[in-house]
Amino acid sequence: MQHRIVTALRACDRGTLGRTISIAENGGEQASQLLQLIKPFICESCVTGLTGPPGSGKSTLLDGLIAEFRRRGLSVAVIAIDPSSPFSGGAVLGDRCRMSRHQSDDKVYIRSLSARGSVGGLSLGIARVIDVLKVSNFDMILLETVGTGQAEVDVMDLVDICVVVCAPNTGDEVQAIKSGILEIADILVVNKTDLSDTNGTLPQLKMAQHLRRNPTRQVPVVPTIATEDKGIEKLADEILKRSQSAGNTGQYEDHAKIRRRLARGIARALEERLFNQDNEMLDQLCTSIQRHKLNVDEAIRIWLDKDASRQQ
Ligand SMILES: Nc1nc2c(ncn2[C@@H]2O[C@H](COP(=O)(O)OP(=O)(O)OP(=O)(O)O)[C@@H](O)[C@H]2O)c(=O)[nH]1
Ligand SMILES: [Mg+2]
């Protein structure tokens, strides 16, 4: 018999979605049990991430995309990640207000998650939340995150389609290139084209594509004015085109992305174990560092050499 939680999730019951997402986000034993329970019921939904500098217009674009996907008869779930930066503290409230016009639509589910206090663990929590949403079988799962730090770039490993949003003439595009998010972009959006001559930004972004590690990968550049719903249709087309080709091959998730996620998850689990468990050798190394007999690099090297010889 199907567990009542699974039945409720499959029926998109809001209360159950809210509760199970909180459990998934928090992690720990309860989350493991939940994930075990829902595993056989996880559907192949396409996950699209929108990332980019603060204020580039991600939430406004998302709002337009929700409307566009709904017009095409698709159900949509949105995860907005509340940046822990104090400068954007009010952002989520604004995001929720902007998107709230969709809240009464039972084919739309919007949820904010907090990035606070989950350094390094953010992407693991979100991966679990995505699994919960996949049980509810939304056609489109959209995720918004500020693309400034490594944690946010890591989050983009969770998505099937990565949309990088830049706004021209603010220096943001340079920032985006620096933080490496263009490397992982599947679609580039140049938003706020009403504010500037796009002549500068579009060639700049196209040039940036040539700097990417794999110049053969075609990355479309979509100009938009999110506040006037301009370019949203084209963006929706590009997202759906990619989603369909991934769906056709039956491979939503990229091998390299899964590998990176796995390595990160293992590293995090090891860190916790090493830090919390008694370990004589680790304590000896710490003492040597305190007494200035070793520096941290040397201690790491000694540890890794010992570990390698143990494995032989
Ligand atoms: N002129 C103009 N303003 C825009 C456009 N898109 C968004 N904005 C405005 O830019 C501001 C920031 O938009 P948001 O959608 O909140 O940007 P965001 O990237 O979600 O911001 P954070 O979540 O704080 O990183 C808002 O005041 C929007 O109204 C656009 O195409 N043209
Ligand atoms: Mg936002």
Image: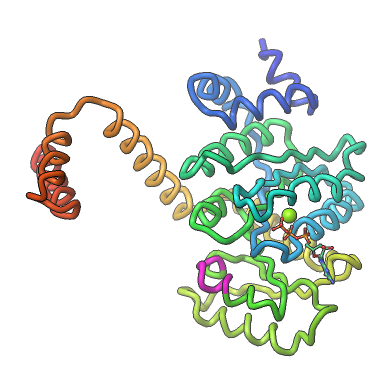
Q: Left of 303 or right of it: where is 42?
A: right
Q: Which of 228 and 297 is in front in this view?
A: 297
**What is the residue that sits farthest to the top in this orientation?**
1
Picture quarter containing residue 18? top right
What stretch of residues is rendered in magenta? 175-181
Instruction: Return the x and y of residue 104 as percentages of the image width and height.
Output: 92, 36
Q: Is residue 225 above or below residue 134?
A: below
Instruction: Return the x and y of residue 65 as percentages of the image width and height.
Output: 82, 56
Q: In which quarter of the image is the N terminus?
A: top right
Q: Which residue is drawn at 78% across and 45% down?
A: 93
Q: Residue at x 51, y 52 (%)?
A: 151
Q: Quadrant of the C terminus?
A: top left
Magenta-colored segment: predominant secondary structure: helix
Q: Nearer the viewer, residue 246 or 8?
A: 8
Count of number-bearing discs? 0
- Image-quarter location of ligand 1: bottom right
Q: Nearer the viewer, residue 170 or 288?
A: 288
**What is the residue that sits farthest to the bottom in this orientation?**
199
**What is the residue that sits farthest to the front in this orientation?**
291
Instruction: Return the x and y of residue 109 as percentages of the image width and height.
Output: 80, 38
Q: Left of 62 or right of it: where is 283?
A: left
Instruction: Return the x and y of residue 192 as percentages of the image width and height.
Output: 80, 73
Q: Left of 186 or right of it: where is 291?
A: left
